[in-house]
Amino acid sequence: NLFLLLSAERPDFTALLGKCRTVEYKGLTSTVEPLPLPGVPSWATPTRIFAPGADGAGIIGLCRGLYISVAVTQKPGGDLSPDDTNALVKLFNDQVAKLEAI
């Protein structure tokens, strides 16, 4: 999944992740933790996500006033392979390069 978002607020996702790693929404609890990924810009935040019914990983960051967010989802309890994380980083960085070229 790839999302480009425009927001009036500019939350610091790394700081939020340090303060809050559990999110409850509509009675479902999800857990988010840092995910060290090589090749991700220092201004972006990579995460590992554990949610009811699906786990995954994502990267979000602010580039030229837009939030770029990419994510991969998988069955609960699945392992992330190097192919998964490499593809996630590549997709994120490719989108950053496209925005920077404009």
Image (cartoon, grey):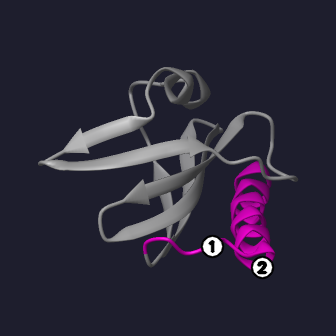
Judged from this view, the residue extending furthest toward the left is 26
The residue at which mark 1 appears reads as 79
Image: 63 above or below 53: above
* Predominant secondary structure, magenta span: helix
| Gap between marks 2 and 1 measured at Cα | 11 Å
Considering the numbered disc 2 on the image, is that residue within a helix, a strand or a loop? helix
Left or right of residue 20: residue 42: right
Residue 65 in the image, given as x and y percentages of width and height: 57, 35
Q: Residue at x 48, y 60 (%)?
A: 3
The magenta stretch is: 76-102
Considering the numbered disc 1 on the image, is that residue within a helix, a strand or a loop? loop
Crowd tier of the residue under label 2, counting other residues whose Cα lies within 10 Å: few below 14, some 14–19, many 20 or above: few
Residue 62 in the image, given as x and y percentages of width and height: 61, 38
Residue 10 visible in the displayed image = yes
The residue at which mark 2 appears reads as 83
Q: Residue at x 77, y 59 (%)?
A: 93
Under mark 2, the amino acid is Asp
Crowd tier of the residue under label 1, counting other residues whose Cα lies within 10 Å: few below 14, some 14–19, many 20 or above: few
Q: Residue at x 69, y 40 (%)?
A: 44
Which one is closest to the eye, mark 2 or mark 1?
1
Residue 12 in the image, given as x and y percentages of width and height: 55, 24
Residue 60 in the image, given as x and y percentages of width and height: 58, 46
Q: Nearer the viewer, residue 41 or 97?
A: 41
Left or right of residue 23: residue 66: right
Quadrant hosting residue 57: bottom right
Magenta-drawn stretch contains 97: yes
Q: Residue at x 65, y 38 (%)?
A: 64
Residue 70 visible in the displayed image = no
Q: Nearer the viewer, residue 33 or 4?
A: 33
Quadrant hosting residue 7: top left
Magenta-drawn stretch contains 91: yes
Image: 93 above or below 29: below
